[in-house]
Image (cartoon, helix red, strand yellow):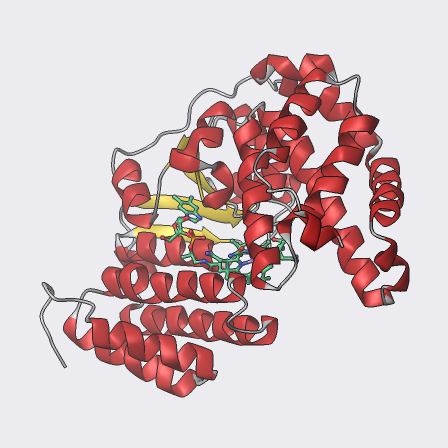
């Protein structure tokens, strides 16, 4: 095996870890990680071996190359691998000289592994970390900030539809004078939504450690702000109306889509549930795009969904009737119709052969 930090982690160990993950072989995966720890720094094992393997799991699931169960198994094994690194390097609390921070996922967020990786890297860098894991309700987050006297809160989110909740959590932290550093895919390319919601952003744990190294300090408590004070476009009420009427929007879209696809009448209960879930997702992403006033958020979601459908043999143009239905239902909302109208152009309409 190639050693030394320069060639680290080797392509061989990356491939071995990947194989162990998709084979669901926890013992083998942990052995690969332990061996990697013998030849390289723990931080690199976390961020350059375990994290990329987990990202590859996501790509393989999206491409329909592995099952949902395999993806779940692989994630559990990755968590075990992170724990193996933590066990092997466990600093004592006395070693935590840099300060104390809190790491948590925003309310509703199940993707805990990214936050765990961030926590372990910060521990290695000498921080005392209170890691609260997945979906932390804002009131409990704040209560814990008070209890621990954390210098900063690090918030993780992978799912953009949770951004309004993240905004609330960021506002609540600022109102008690604690700076927030946000990270994860939800915060958009180069963290553009983090800044919009008045948080700092870091692309990964190493960048977060560098920012924290400048020693964030608590500021004076700031007055609680309403969402529209940060985001004046919310005054047009489009976001609020789409959220309020979401059940009706989903129901009517389902009716309209079924009219366009008579084959749907023969769908099994399972297929129907998935379709409702997909439409629910479309409306939720539209609402979030209205919240941050960025059509790109919705368009990236539509492109992502189109790829997921295509990988499963479902033609992406199936999304068009849902977009058309929403365009009709939301005809009086200029920002929503602008976003939906542009999204139509991302999908190639069916040719005559596909419609036959
Ligand atoms: C494992 C997984 C799950 C597991 C999570 C279990 C767990 N314990 O974490 C389960 C099965 C629960 C799950 C559920 C869902 N998932 Co999922 N999941 C994944 C997967 C495969 C891996 C996540 C991961 O660990 N990534 C590896 C880490 C290392 O990468 P990362 O997230 O980018 O984190 C790095 C940086 O962003 C940054 N960072 C992250 N957080 C923070 C925080 C701070 C403060 C800082 C500074 C930095 C930072 O540092 C990290 C380390 O370098 C991803 C695919 C992917 N590419 O990530 C999908 C993925 C995130 N999931 C996805 C989806 C859609 C879902 C579901 C909605 C599916 C469903 N229909 O139910 C639900 C959502 C549930 C919810 N409400 O949260 C989509 C999201 C797409 C989108 N456009 O929104 C993805 C991208 C899958 C895909 N390829 O399409 N999922």
Write the residue at 31% across / 68% down. Answer: 90
Q: Is residue 264 visible?
A: yes
Write the residue at 67% across / 33% down. Answer: 286
Q: Is residue 41 above or below residue 155?
A: below
Quarter in which the C terminus is drawn: bottom right
Q: Nearer the viewer, residue 205 or 92?
A: 205
Q: Nearer the viewer, residue 312 or 206?
A: 312
Quarter in which the N terminus is drawn: bottom left
- Report the side of 39 relative to 231 (left or right): left
Write the residue at 65% across / 44% down. Answer: 137
Q: Is residue 133 visible?
A: no
Q: Is residue 323 above or below residue 26?
A: above
- Report the side of 13 relative to 290 (left or right): left
Q: Which image quadrant is residue 289 in?
A: top right
Q: Nearer the viewer, residue 335 or 350?
A: 350
Residue 55, position in %: x, y? Answer: 41, 60
Looking at the rendered structure, the number of numbered marks drawn on it comes to 0
């Amino acid at each position: 095996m190639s050693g030394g930090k320069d060639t680290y982690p080797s392509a061989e160990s990356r491939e071995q870890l990947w194989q162990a993950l998709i084979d669901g072989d926890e013992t083998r995966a942990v052995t690969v990680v332990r061996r990697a720890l013998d030849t390289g720094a723990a931080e690199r094992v976390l961020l350059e071996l375990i994290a990329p393997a987990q990202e590859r799991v996501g790509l393989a699931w999206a491409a329909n190359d592995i099952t949902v169960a395999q993806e779940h198994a692989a994630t559990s094994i990755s968590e075990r691998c992170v724990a193996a690194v933590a066990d092997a390097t466990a600093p004592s609390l006395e070693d935590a000289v840099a300060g104390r921070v809190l790491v948590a996922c925003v309310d509703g967020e199940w993707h805990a592994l990214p936050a765990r990786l961030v926590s372990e890297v910060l521990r290695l860098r000498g921080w005392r970390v209170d890691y609260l894991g997945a979906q932390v309700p804002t009131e409990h987050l704040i209560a814990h900030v008070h209890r621990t006297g954390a210098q900063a809160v690090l918030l993780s989110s992978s799912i953009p539809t949770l951004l309004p909740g993240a905004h609330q959590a960021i506002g609540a932290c600022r109102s008690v004078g604690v700076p927030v550093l946000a990270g994860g895919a939800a915060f958009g390319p180069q963290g553009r939504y983090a800044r919009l919601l008045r948080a700092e952003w870091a692309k990964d744990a190493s960048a977060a450690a560098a920012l924290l190294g400048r020693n964030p300090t608590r500021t004076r408590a700031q007055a609680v702000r309403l969402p529209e004070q940060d985001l004046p476009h919310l005054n047009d009420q489009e976001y609020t109306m789409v959220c309020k009427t979401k059940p009706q929007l989903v129901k009517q879209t389902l009716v309209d889509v079924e009219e366009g696809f008579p084959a749907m009448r023969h769908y099994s209960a399972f297929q129907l549930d998935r379709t409702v879930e997909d439409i629910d997702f479309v409306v939720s992403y539209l609402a979030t795009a209205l919240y941050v006033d960025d059509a790109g958020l919705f368009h990236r979601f539509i492109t992502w969904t189109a790829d997921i459908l295509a990988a499963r043999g479902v033609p992406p143009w199936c999304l068009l009737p849902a977009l058309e239905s929403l365009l009709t239902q939301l005809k009086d909302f200029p920002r929503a119709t602008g976003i939906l109208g542009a999204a139509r152009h991302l999908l190639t309409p069916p040719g005559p052969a596909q419609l036959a």
